[in-house]
Image (spheres, rainbow, N blue to C red):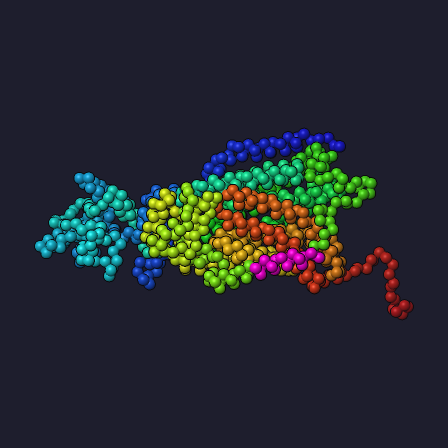
Amino acid sequence: MKKINQKRIMIFFTTIAIVLLTAVVFGKGIIDNMKLGLDLRGGFAIVYEVEPLVKDQPLPELSTVAAAVRKRVDVLGVNEPVITIEGENRVRIELAGVQNQEQARKIISSTANLTFRDVNDNVLLDASSIADGGASLVYNLGNPQVSLKIKDKEKFAAATRAVAARASSNENYIVAWLDFEEGKDSYAVERTKATPKFISAATVSEEINGDAVISGNFTSESAKELASLINAGSLPVKMNQIQTNVVSAQFGELAYKQTMFAGALGVVAVMVFMVLTYKIMGVISAITLLAYALFVLFSFNLMGGTFTLSGIAAFVLGIGMTVDASVITFERIKDSLYAGRNVKSAVAEGNKKSFSTIIDSQITTFIAAVILFILGEGTIKGFATMLMMTVVGTFLINVLLVKLLLNLIVKSNYLDDKKTWFGVKLQHIPDVSKGESKKYFGIFPNFDFVKHAKKAIIVSVAVLALGLLSAVYHGATTGKPLNLGIDFASGSKITVQSQTAIVTDELAQIFINNGYTASNIRLEGDSKNIATATFTDAIEQTKLEKIKADIKAKYNTDANDSVVSPKIGREIARSAIIISAIAWVAIMIYISVRFKWDYAVSGLFALVHDVLFLIAVFAIVRFEINIEFIAVILSIIGYSIDDTIVVFDRIRENVDSTKNQIKPSEYRRVVNEALQQVLGRSLINTFTTILPLFFLLGLGSGSVFVFNFAMLIGLIAGAYSSVFIAAQLWLFIRTKYTPKVPHKKTRKNIDSISEVIIPGIND
């Protein structure tokens, strides 16, 4: 045994200590600085469709509209509002922690176009006559008023002088309007109403040369709100609300705590499993997994990313998926040890052989994430960002740091005679010095996968057929082949979380009393204290507020609500199909370049199978399909092709080892050998990915139960299809179409004696 290099061992433990110390010192701060989304903090999101104030007039730049909206949001005192432009005429506004949602809606959507008019509705002055920030709340004998600092005092004096001259006809009024609509509003009509639309109608008896005061039937809050709106300026457009999502603070806080707790347990479970399975390599994996978690969370915070329930679920899922890179490397190292290599050679060989597989699998996942980020909106975009961070973190931390720590401890010579520390058994390791050959060939050394593939395919066909029959039956009886959520079908959803059990009939009666009948009311939670009611109609905002007020009076809790218009529902459905199709095509092109076309076709077919399998299961169990279902589909696309590439990489390696001198009849053996070699690691990959999901399903928030269930089914389908769909289809194609072996021209050996033709002698 060589002399132990103490310096390398010292660096090894110092690196581990730095990771642990970083986690202890900065971990809590990183978690505390997480920017929580609406579903974790409470608040509401609204999507407005923007229209010009005057029909057929061109829209102003949406950046100008967004800036005007931001001024209004600042009036509300909301921390870190999210205002984004979507498409050509939409603005999404997300406000976390808002207490008075109705006030916020009014301030945001009101055009706040202030005008001063005479009794005949002629414009005398507009908001341009008021100084910037010149509106303020004042009191006169205890009565709230709005004081206005006049910028153009000469113009204001002329206007008030003209109004005062009408005193003889009793028309000396200056009327203050907010959002006067030409052809619809009128002082003559509004003056007869108990609550007129105009703000005030002040008598003017003489010319006013100074500032002005608007007095009316104000409360302190309404006067302050008016002053804030005037200061924020008018909006140059109409804001039509087409989608809303409201989450109560209580609901969000509980969901956050449950998801984080379940996620933490899931991460610890993965670490423990890796240590038990891979010994010293598992310890290294656990340490680097901790570094990975810190890196991804810190980077996401640095980017200003917003953590949502699905985003945290994606992060925890990413923990399991990123372990795949370590598993691929560790299993390659074990293969080399079982082949009789020494520790140093096995580690070097394992790192080298696993690198291309890891790169291919991570790039395909990254492709899906980029497409999701570019084409997705809202929480889907946040999910995609987290998925991209997972890929970057996997490469930088789980590949480079694992390799660094492994090389440090291995090249220290300390593990030269400790092969069992790598999770292998001595009785399985051949002694090559005695001429022994390989003894261990995995946990499925003689299983004929090709032979049994038909049985597995029959199971798939049966599930797909049951899903189709269920969809046809429910389509004929209810008109809904799939249980599409309001994200796709449009409508409204109200969620109530009570301290006590909720009686369905009592909740339904509240809706009926307000003129609505829920199409479905679903109870959740161990004590049936969470109820979700869905409606086929997009409930009007005023009626929605009345329903929520009645719910609060009954259950003493704020309800969550989500409303999607039919127009945006259709667009989401269309976008979902486009996103999936583009992801498939992009991944197929990449595999064709990296492998061959038959690998790409087989992989694509497996992806389509996974998506259809997931949809079929949802058709059978009738779980709701919502916008986050698209995130699941694209995650499964990334994961499934990741697992398929591991299989394809080994098939390609076995084919290349024959230098393409292989007969069609021998491809069956190649596929069986490849699957026998990789199935063990594929099962471990799948298990480490699914393990966090078990905790999220059992202990996480009910808000993401369907999301996590979909991920579980998709992951199982992805692992299964890699073996029994992708590999088997590749075998079928390759057997029917065998690539031509390039003919190599042989060169004559000029050093050997050749017959020389001499004219006239031996020609």
> In which quadrant is the C terminus drawn?
bottom right
Q: Is residue 731 visible?
A: yes
Q: 656 or 496, which lies in front?
A: 496
Q: Residue 472 placed where, x, y %? A: 52, 63
Prevailing secondary structure of the magenta residues: helix
Q: Residue furthest left?
A: 168
Residue 637 occupies which quadrant of the picture? bottom right
Q: Residue 677 placed where, x, y %? A: 70, 49
Residue at x 49% of width, y 35% of height: 28
Q: Left or right: 62 with respect to 621?
A: left
- Residue 605 lies, with reference to residue 362, above or below; the image says below
Residue at x 73% of width, y 39% of height: 425
Q: 761 or 41, which lies in front?
A: 41
Q: 517 or 432, which lies in front?
A: 517
- Residue 404 lies, with reference to residue 728, above or below; the image says above
Residue at x 36% of width, y 43% of height: 556
Q: 290 or 1, which lies in front?
A: 290
Q: Left or right: 403 with respect to 751?
A: left
Q: Magenta region: which residues?
A: 450-466
